[in-house]
Image (cartoon, rainbow, N blue to C red):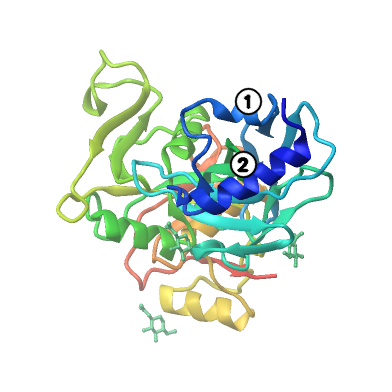
């Protein structure tokens, strides 16, 4: 058997001679590949990388830590130099994207994560990823990969944002949006297209909507809690009905938007008289706020318990109100955000405003 110092020397030698590009973008020597030599050279020492099995839940704008630790079995006495790479796994077959690469105490972040991520290394072997100021579309599966020149091991952890899903139809009515327009419509409402997991959770919580809508992965689906003839038929069990992937430019549907917690607050504006739409926009401005968007009203209903039995204008020209405790003359028996569509803009109503903190 080789001793470790000798082994290290031998490896450096081999590394120098056999350095070859490895598919993950690092230079990685090939002595381990497929021939089982590794375990002999390495004296049966193995690298283990571990993370949390259950998904991590967080809300928009918060900071979250995705845990990851590595260790060797049996334990090593001399620390080894490792590289750490965090990446995000694609949803529908797309490309894996780099999030962060670290060597020692230096690190580099990429793309949308630039300046928003760092490693937490509080204990030996900890290489957790901290993401700050979470975006609505940061949900997904993340891979923690540790590369020590000898071995390359990884573990995958899932991040899910807590939030609320709402179906969205623009003023033009049903089935007006291609994929890009649906994405845009959700963003305009301070939301993002929902993903499958988010729509599924919403369905579990009772969302029933008999119009098909785009999801973030380019599929079109709708959630049914009570089977009925016009919504897939009586013979079909309740669940998500899927049309599968649709043409992103040519096909038109509604959208399922996803919103999460708010930095500010939504409130029903106290005003001496009712307002048409133009006056409503102006009244919020005069109150050092802006007219609330649909996603903000849903978030306030879900996260801040906003309950108000007064219909109010929203930024897209729709009229809605949020109910937590159902009561007579305030809509159906279930809690929810009630919608009255898009009235003519000269009609007079209340207004919901949003003030950022
Ligand atoms: C999140 O982390 C950033 C630094 O990365 C810090 O400035 C900010 O205060 C943190 N926010 C919260 C809510 O902890
Ligand atoms: C995620 O949202 C940010 C804005 O919050 C946007 O800049 C980015 O393009 C989005 N990324 C994806 C993959 O949709
Ligand atoms: C709302 O009322 C104002 C007068 O207070 C009027 O100037 C404006 O044109 C009206 N807007 C609409 C959309 O009817």
User: Which residue is at a point 64% across and 41% down the rendered structure image?
Assistant: 57
* Quadrant field for ligand 3: bottom left
Point out residue 202 in the picture as x, y percentages from the top left corner: 49, 35
- The circle on residue 40 is 1
Point out residue 65 in the picture as x, y percentages from the top left corner: 70, 48
Identify the secondary structure beneath mark 2: loop
For residue 215, say whether it is visible. Answer: yes
Q: Is residue 72 left or right of residue 254?
A: right
From the image, state whether disc 2 or disc 1 is nearer to you.
1
Q: Residues within 10 Å of mark 2 (few under 14, many from 20)?
A: some
For residue 309, say whether it is visible. Answer: no
* C-alpha span from label 2 to label 1: 65 Å
In front here: 5 or 153? 5
In front here: 343 or 98? 98
Q: Is residue 344 placed above or below 13 in the rendered structure?
A: below
User: Which residue is at a point 45% across and 48% down the rendered structure image?
Assistant: 22
Q: Is residue 238 left or right of residue 312?
A: left
Point out residue 106 in the picture as x, y percentages from the top left corner: 69, 64
Quadrant location, the N terminus: top right
Q: Is residue 344 placed above or below 41 in the rendered structure?
A: below
Quadrant location, the C terminus: bottom right
- The circle on residue 324 is 2
Point out residue 18 in the picture as x, y percentages from the top left corner: 49, 48
Q: Is residue 240 placed above or below 24 in the rendered structure?
A: above
Q: Is residue 10 left or right of residue 171?
A: right
Identify the secondary structure beneath mark 1: helix
């Amino acid at each position: 058997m080789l001793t470790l110092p000798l082994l290290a020397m031998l490896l450096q030698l081999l590394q120098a001679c056999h350095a070859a590009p490895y598919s993950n973008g690092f230079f990685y020597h090939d002595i381990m590949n497929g021939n089982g030599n590794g375990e002999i050279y390495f004296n049966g020492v193995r690298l283990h990388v571990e993370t949390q099995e259950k998904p991590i839940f967080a809300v928009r704008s918060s900071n979250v830590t995705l845990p990851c630790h590595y260790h060797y079995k049996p334990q090593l006495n001399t620390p080894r130099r490792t590289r750490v790479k965090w990446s995000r796994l694609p949803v529908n077959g797309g490309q894996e994207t780099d999030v962060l690469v670290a060597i020692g105490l230096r690190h580099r972040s990429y793309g949308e994560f630039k300046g928003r991520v760092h490693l937490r290394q509080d204990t030996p072997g900890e290489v957790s990823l901290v993401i700050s100021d979470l975006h609505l579309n940061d949900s997904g599966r993340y891979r923690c990969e540790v590369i020590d020149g000898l071995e390359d091991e990884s573990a995958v952890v899932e991040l899910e944002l807590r939030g609320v899903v709402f179906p969205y139809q623009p003023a033009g009515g049903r089935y007006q949006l291609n994929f890009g327009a649906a994405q845009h419509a959700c963003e305009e409402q301070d939301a993002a297209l929902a993903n499958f997991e988010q729509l599924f959770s919403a369905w579990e919580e009772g969302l029933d909507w008999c119009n098909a809508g785009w999801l973030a992965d380019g599929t079109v689906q709708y959630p049914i809690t009570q089977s009925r003839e016009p919504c897939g038929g009586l013979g079909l069990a309740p669940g998500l009905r899927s049309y599968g992937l649709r043409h992103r430019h040519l096909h038109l549907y509604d959208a399922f938007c996803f919103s999460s917690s708010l930095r500010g607050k939504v409130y029903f504006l106290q005003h001496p008289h009712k307002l048409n739409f133009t006056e409503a926009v102006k009244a919020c401005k005069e109150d050092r706020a802006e007219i609330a968007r649909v996603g903000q009203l849903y978030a306030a209903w879900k996260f801040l318990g906003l309950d108000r039995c007064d219909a109010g204008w929203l930024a897209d020209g729709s009229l809605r109100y949020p109910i937590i405790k159902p009561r007579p003359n305030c809509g159906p028996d279930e809690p929810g955000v009630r919608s009255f569509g898009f009235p003519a803009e000269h009609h007079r109503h209340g207004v919901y405003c949003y003030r950022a903190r």
